[in-house]
Amino acid sequence: MSKNQFSKGQIVLSYFTIIRIVNGIVSGFAAAFGLVLSFDTDIVSASDIDYLSLGLVVLAAALVSCQAMIFNDIADREEDKINAPHRPIPSGKISVKAAYIYGVIVASLALITGIVIDVINGLPGLSVITVLIFGGSLDLYDFKLKKLGIWGNATIGMNVTALFVYGALHTKLVYGGTFQYVPIIVGAAAGLGNIGREVIKGLPDVEGDREAGVKTLAVKFGVKYAAAIGSFFLFCLLTGGGIAVFIGLEYLVSIIIGSLIIALVLFLAVAILINQSPKWAYTTKEILLIVFLVFLLLFIVDKIVFLALN
């Protein structure tokens, strides 16, 4: 379909949808989680928090995720003709050349934001190095590692965990105090949970992935086996998340909400074992994204309120 068959509004909207803004926000809050949950309450109060830096950390991580989503759609354009022909590139709303330019611009903005964070906080290149490694490994995943199946999924998991580690290191270097381990526990659990989500994402895309030579677990061993592995990693998320709820949250209402989120993940982990239909697999991976976002926000708000009241 020719690009001129679309309205300007449709084309503009496609530049927004290709970056998968919700994924970017989740990445941003993962880094913010590691930062906020690492505050030593004996030496840091709510008034000590540099909210500008916190916002810039969220922005930098989000931009890295967004540029990776653009390059992901470039790399997946052939299988998307089968799996998701409505997406901006296979539908013709965005050309491959325009997508490359867009991706480079967003990646450059992420790097500039990382530089600003390091300069205003006197950090020794921590943010810049994180942006380069995080962004580079995600782009490598898009063009190379994704075809390796579970090993590519593991790359996503490790990058997710690295965001939490970055936040913890940022706080240690800027605010001092003792190194906190709750963010690392949650980061490891989130990394494993994201591996499970990536495995589940492969369930609806078997036809297009097989055609493109992407060796997902669903392609190699079938959807039932892949669902079982995805469920296993969700149970790992349950374990780490459950520990964090009871040792990392300060208020009863937060613990109740956290417990309900854990119960939802338990339901999803069991349900995918029963139903591997493309529609349910897609629904599961979308719900998990929202679960990650709400879970991270819960901890961040709980911690900031605690600091403000104590």
Image (tube, helix red, strand yellow):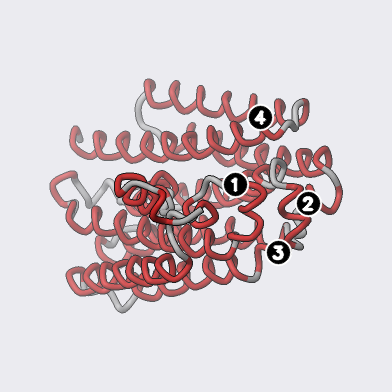
Tell me the mark number nearer the camera, choosing from 1 and 3. 1
Q: Is residue 97 above or below residue 88?
A: below
The kind of residue on which mark 2 rests is Leu
In terms of depth relative to the viewer, which is nearer, 245 or 59? 59
Task: Name which of mark 1 and mark 4 comes first in the sequence.
Answer: 1
Q: Which residue is mark 2?
A: 217
Task: Give the left or right position of residue 94, taking residue 48 as reference.
Answer: right
The residue depicted at 49 percent of the width and 34 percent of the height is 291
Give residue 196's position: percent from left, percent from top. 66, 45
Q: Earlier in the sequence, mark 3 or mark 2?
A: 3
**Total marks placed:** 4
- On the image, numbered disc 1 is attached to which residue? 84
- Position of 143 with respect to 217 (left or right) is left
Sequence-earlier tag: 4 or 3:
3
- CB under 8 Å between discs 4 and 3: no
Could you tell me the amino acid type at mark 3? Answer: Lys
Spot occupied by residue 303 in the image (x, y as percentages of width and height): 31, 39
Task: Pick the residue in front: 113 or 92.
Answer: 92
